[in-house]
Amino acid sequence: MRSLIDILELTTEELSGLISVANDIIDHPQKYAEACKGKKLATLFFEPSTRTRLSFEAAMYELGGNVLGFSEAQSSSAAKGESVADTAKTISCYADIIAMRHPKEGAPLVASMNASVPVINAGDGGHNHPTQTLADLLTIYREKGGFDNLTIGLCGDLKFGRTVHSLIAAMSRYKNIKFVLISPEELKLPSYVKKDILKKNGIPYEQTTDLLSVMPELDILYMTRVQRERFFNEEDYLRLKDSYILTPEKLETAKETLSIMHPLPRVNEISVAIDDDPRACYFKQVLNGKYMRMALILKLLEVEV
């Protein structure tokens, strides 16, 4: 029995396998319509979520399985003080696989150590969000045809963005990758990510506060929102918040083949005027997330189609 807590638990060969299954699901959905008949997914969401929770539910339903669970901690026994370990042991009696989101970093790992069924980390604090990274990887694969020889711009909140940290870790295993880190000084990529992943693997990167200056070299632009609550003073936030709003004018120097990504939800960092640009991939990302979650559920349940 196997769980997925961190994206690096999957080898590049396993990622290729998941992408292959996801592409097959896209091409032949009917083939998978009863793959998980009689199986149950428990969604344990101790923190609000729209996309991730509904994506897991849609994935299981489209595989012919069933879903049970809750969408907020208040409606679970955690409100009575039950431990994550006990919750995991209990839910294992009802479900075949668990998807868990929790505000505390490490909670899904604790659940996986106590559950008798596979556990998927659906986001733990600012730590990990491996299935968002799977969505990102399928999007990059389908847009670019592979993962080698790409210059990836990461823009916005690189300090607290768990999706950014996971994507850097995943992409660092491919050939000839370069990262361009675009953020305010206050929200730069943490030094431990630079040290443990970029420097350790000899991956070239540049840091800048100016999106426009690096736009022409990017193959992928991964936007994230600059979060007001992360700033120590309102002046700094107001000074910086508009510098990372992507508008059609800012794309004038961008490649025709640029892929614009965003883990969503967006607030105002990508103008809605860009939604119709063929380079916009963020709603494709949402759909790709469902297909990758379907592939992952099949893998962890060891279902062969």
Image (cartoon, rainbow, N blue to C red):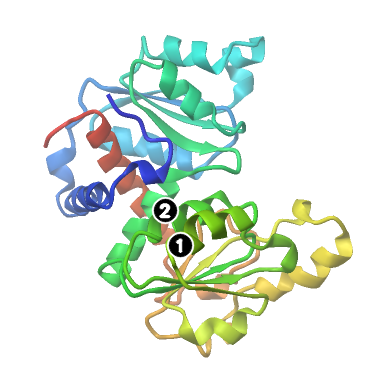
Q: Dot 2: few (<14), some (14–19), or many (≥20) neighbours within 10 Å?
A: many
Label 2, on which residue? 286
Q: Residue furthest bottom?
A: 253
What amino acid type should be assigned to the residue bearing mark 2?
Val
Which secondary structure lies at badge 2? helix
Does residue 276 lie above or below 162 as drawn? below
Q: Which mark is residue 282?
A: 1
Q: Nearer the viewer, residue 255 or 29?
A: 255
Residue found at x 44% / y 68% = 203
Q: Position of residue 82 (x, y in %)?
A: 59, 11
Does residue 116 lie above or below 109 as drawn? above
Q: Position of residue 272 (x, y in %)?
A: 57, 70
Q: Position of residue 5 (x, y in %)?
A: 43, 35
Question: Looking at the figure, which quarter contains the N terminus?
Answer: top left
Q: Position of residue 222 (x, y in %)?
A: 50, 66
Q: Label 1 near label 2: C-beta < 8 Å? A: yes
Give the left or right position of residue 244, taking residue 30 as reference. Answer: right
Residue found at x 35% / y 61% = 139
Question: Looking at the figure, which quarter contains the C terminus?
Answer: top left
Give the left or right position of residue 186, taking residue 98 as reference. Answer: right
What amino acid type should be assigned to the residue bearing mark 1?
Tyr
Give the left or right position of residue 181, taking residue 217 as reference. Answer: right
Q: Nearer the viewer, residue 70 or 123?
A: 123
